[in-house]
Amino acid sequence: MKANAANFLEFLRKSPQFVIPIYQRAYSWTREECKQLWDDILRAGRNDSVSSHFVGSIVYIEKEIYQVTSQSQLLVIDGQQRLTTVSLLIAALAQELERADRREPIEGFSPRKLRNYYLVNPEEDGDLHYKLLLSETDRATLCAIVRGDELPRDLSLRIRDNFEFFKEKIAASNGDLTALCRGLAKLVLVDIALTRGQDDPQLIFESMNSTGRELSQADLIRNYILMGLEPGLQTRLYTEQWRPMEKGFGQEAYSVHFDSFMRHYLTMKTGDIPNVREVYEAFKAFARSGKSPNVEAMVRELREYAAYYCAMALGIERDKTLRWAFEDLRDLKVDVAYPFLLEVYGDYDRGVLSHQDFVTVVRLVEAYVFRRAVCAIPTNSLNKTFATLTKVIRKDRYVESLQAHLLNLRSYRRFPMDEEFRRALETRDLYHFGPRRTYWLRRMENHGRKERVTVNEYTIEHIMPQNEDLPAAWREALGPEWQRIHQTWLHTLGNLTLTGYNSEYRDRPFAEKRDMPGGFKESPLRLNEGLAQVEQWTEEAIKARADRLSMLALKVWPTPELPTELLDGYRPSSKASTGGYSIESHPALLTSPMRELFEAFRREVLALDECVTEEFLKLYVAYKAETNFVDVVPQTRRLRLSLNMPFSEIRDPRGMCKDVSNVGRWGNGDVEVGLGSIEDLPYVVTLVRQSFERQMGDDT
């Protein structure tokens, strides 16, 4: 490796051609970064005391072994964004000087010199004509700009937008371009040339982007997969698999959604949910584990599952019934279900389950999530529920096994039954329901329709107005308890509907809203059915409408129906699982006082949640939710507890915990704590609860 400081423009002038390898990400700078560069250049150009402005490094390696008879292409490992942006600025400057028929603002900055020194190799033809060749997404657009031609139809949005930005800035300079030219002449960089056969581009690339702040996790993954391949395979995989996958997302969606897709893909493959900031590291671990297919098969598989993801998350599903189902999931914000649904979609694509069964599965996921949201059940366990859901699916009984599993879930994971769901739905504030506010109205309005109503054309109407200072007519209609009624029922199911006449309704009395032109009597919306027959809008009327709509909701978000005997066949084993061992298998627990202490401890732990199970093993007792969260090794004078969590995360003001991450112990976890007296039990249970809640509630 050779590193030297260099003037940016001289660096461009002396270099024959830079090529962005196919595995590099597309050009990604926004106007914000371009504005920062513009401001920095002008600041340097206007300040005579500033001799240079540093813009970073350019890391490159010769594409092939150097030959005297051919022009050597340089593959850019790092620095694409700076090279491309400065090239766009130079192209915009040259175009403006040509348009205005201007001579050099300062020596060396004529349009001809700008092009022939920094943008093209004037004596070369074809691709070799250009100083900078970008990857496929951006190449044609930059080349057209350099030539001064019309932009291609399938253009690069970022290249076009940033070129237009620089043109606007230059035009706004009113012909005073001296500071710009001086600033460009002061740009300096670190020129880092790698030696083929000696330097490892992948390791250098990773070290320069180790924080992940410049490149997305998906960019790092793509480079990891493609960078080390021999050129022929690299080109073929990119052209046949990776590039079509990028196009499937689209330019803007790729940069926004691909990281999420990779996280969902890894969750599906491993059952573990990567931290959103550590997807790249999780992918490398997966690729090195031996569980992943070979590189070529893995890239094909990524393209396959990316297509499923785009169908679900980006609204490009072709089948109408599935497209509507996925739209509802997106409105409900059910991203956590995507790892599960990716595998289900794959099974559907391979014919493992039918179209109707696939729709049923998607709608079942929707009902499960929405019912829980209405019942205000904490959502922090949903990611782990869906991450492991395929493990319980019997693929010969796909829908039945999923229905049975969801119905058998208990406590914070439960599928709310009809009575609980109806009660919560009728009384919950559904107006302040976050992104789901229009979702539930649209779903109820369109249930059973083949021609869907677009809710965006309507606004939410409070039949009883929101105005805290209700008009006299409303107070009289509601009666002496109008304040309680208003406070209790204002934002609830029975009082909310859709209308296109919100501004006309205002705070009018109910009878006027009902009978006016465009009023409830004339409404074509199903949500407004029955309002024409209501004489007075009272508490009883609100309750009656809520009752009717909540019955409809049971059809929109139905509970699976399975015979009791069939459901029992899927039911998990009882709370106490012995595995052939029992409390008598542990001599330390057969006498006082350890027996009494253990009994008190187990009561507290089993009371944490209905999902907690107890299993006696040969050497310890395990307490599980998803998996072991605390293990107990009975000893003569204490209970030695292993908490299954990192020591760095435990909150232990009394300092009772010990770090055993590098010590061999029976039990699972890096945290050890001893319980020797009943007086310490309340505090120790708070430590155990941390391990339990971490297992249940980690959404990172």
Image (cartoon, rainbow, N blue to C red):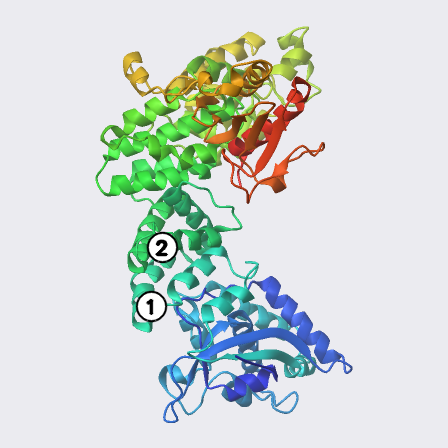
Q: Is residue 181 left or right of residue 530?
A: right
Look at label 2 and name its amino acid: Gly
SS for tag 1? helix
Query: Is residue 332 at least partly visible in the picture?
Result: no
In-front residue for pair 121/52: 52
- Residue 214 image position (x, y, % from top left): 55, 62
Q: Is residue 588 left or right of residue 575?
A: right
As drawn, 84 above or below 383: below
Q: Residue drawn 42% across and 74% down?
A: 150
- Residue 406 image position (x, y, % from top left): 38, 24
**Residue picked out by circle 1:** 234
**Residue picked out by circle 2:** 248
In-front residue for pair 493/612: 612
* Residue found at the very far right of the displayed protein: 49
Q: Which mark is residue 490?
A: none
Q: Residue drawn 56% across and 12% down?
A: 537
Q: Which quadrant of the structure image shows residue 325?
A: top left
As drawn, 168 above or below 48: above
- Residue 556 image position (x, y, % from top left): 38, 23
Q: Is residue 594 left or right of residue 680?
A: left
- Residue 650 image position (x, y, % from top left): 63, 36
Is the residue marked by circle 2 packed among few (<14), some (14-19), or many (20+) residues within 10 Å? some
SS for tag 2? helix
Indicate which label's residue lies in the foreground, 2 or 1: 1
Is the residue marked by circle 1 packed among few (<14), some (14-19), or many (20+) residues within 10 Å? some
Q: Which quadrant of the structure image shows residue 269?
A: top left
Q: Which quadrant of the structure image shows residue 240?
A: bottom left
Disc count in the image?
A: 2
As drawn, 652 above or below 524: below
Look at label 1 and name its amino acid: Gln
| Disc on the earlier residue, 2 or 1 | 1
